[in-house]
Amino acid sequence: MIVDSHIHWPVGANDDPAPFLKVLDRYGTDRAVVSGWEVFLRPGSVAMWNDRLAGFCRRSGGRLVPLATFYLADGEAAVREARRSLEELGARGFKYHPWLQGENIFCETMYEVCRLAGRFHAPILFHDGTPVYSLSSQIAVLAGLFPKTLFILGHGGILHFWEEALEAARQYPNIHIALCGQHPWAMQAACDKLPPTRLLWGSDYVGPGAEEFIAYRRGLFDRLALSRDVRAAILGENPKRLFRLEE
């Protein structure tokens, strides 16, 4: 099984998942853990976009599961929306983009969401690797504060902060790294230095017209020096476990 653990779709224009599923089929991807796109630019309410994403995924025949989001500026309303997404919408975790959303993660609202995510065994997938709000080391501080919560570095430091991401994962066993956006040297280093159970693969595909994201990042992964078992764990077994895809 191949699961794309870091992928997006614009759910505002079309609520039919068939075109998205056809893209996955072309690249042999069985399932995907999907984040919205428009919600990060915040036109309208966050709840509306979480609802649309959840409905989109429900119509996929079980192949797509949603990651909800929230805005820290909403305070307690953000925590309520996070809980609603888990309890009512079927979200399997959260995607949070501190850099694009323009929020500092060190606040009581984020701490409450982390506590909530820990109770629900719901991972928080962060965009990481871009200053000033999205450094891997900043997310590592949260991992230290909330050891029962699962954190995923969505880009493993991207191109310039990959060593920082590896050190964060080395120090905190509740940090996982997505092989999604790094250069091949960094991807191989992550595979060589971390337990294979702590790694995922993702394309960061952002919707129509961007299929090269999937082709390029799958190609980088396919060229890594990995055993068959490790490859299978990264592509399928780990995301199935982390996002509870068998539930």
Image: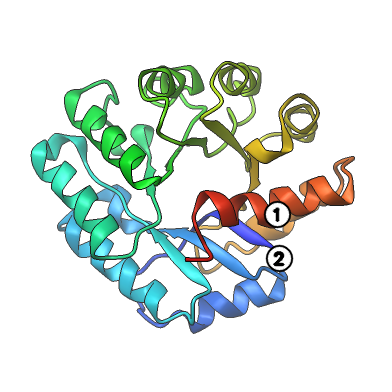
- Relative depth, front residue between 159 and 147: 147
Q: Is residue 171 above or below residue 83?
A: above
Name which residue lies at 60% across and 31% down. Answer: 156
For disc 1, the neighbor class at 10 Å (few under 14, some 14 to 19, many from 20) is: many
Q: Horizontal and vertical percent for residue 205?
A: 56, 57
Task: Read off the residue under disc 2.
Answer: 1
Q: Which picture quadrant has residue 67?
A: bottom left
- Relative depth, front residue between 2 and 205: 2
Q: Is residue 30 above or below residue 217?
A: below
Residue 74 seen: yes
- Relative depth, front residue between 15 and 195: 195
Mark 1 and mark 2 residues within 8 Å of each other at the beta carbon: yes
- Relative depth, front residue between 201 and 212: 201
Q: Which mark is residue 132?
A: none
Q: Horizontal and vertical percent for residue 51?
A: 24, 67
Name which residue lies at 11% across and 36% down. Answer: 75
Q: Is residue 177 above or below residue 45?
A: above
Q: Which picture quadrant has residue 113?
A: top left
Q: Horizontal and vertical percent for residue 216?
A: 73, 53
**In the figure, is residue 209 to the left or right of 230?**
left
Q: Horizontal and vertical percent for residue 104?
A: 27, 24
In which quadrant is the N terminus drawn?
A: bottom right
**In the figure, is residue 166 to the left or right of 232?**
left
Q: Which amino acid type is shown beneath numbered disc 2?
A: Met
Q: Which mark is residue 235?
A: 1
Return the disc, 1 or 2, that comes first in the chain's sequence.
2
Q: Which amino acid type is shown beneath numbered disc 1?
A: Leu
Label 2's element?
loop
**In the figure, is residue 205 to the left or right of 104?**
right
Residue 204 seen: no
Q: What is the CA distance from the residue labelled 1 to the residue labelled 2?
A: 7 Å
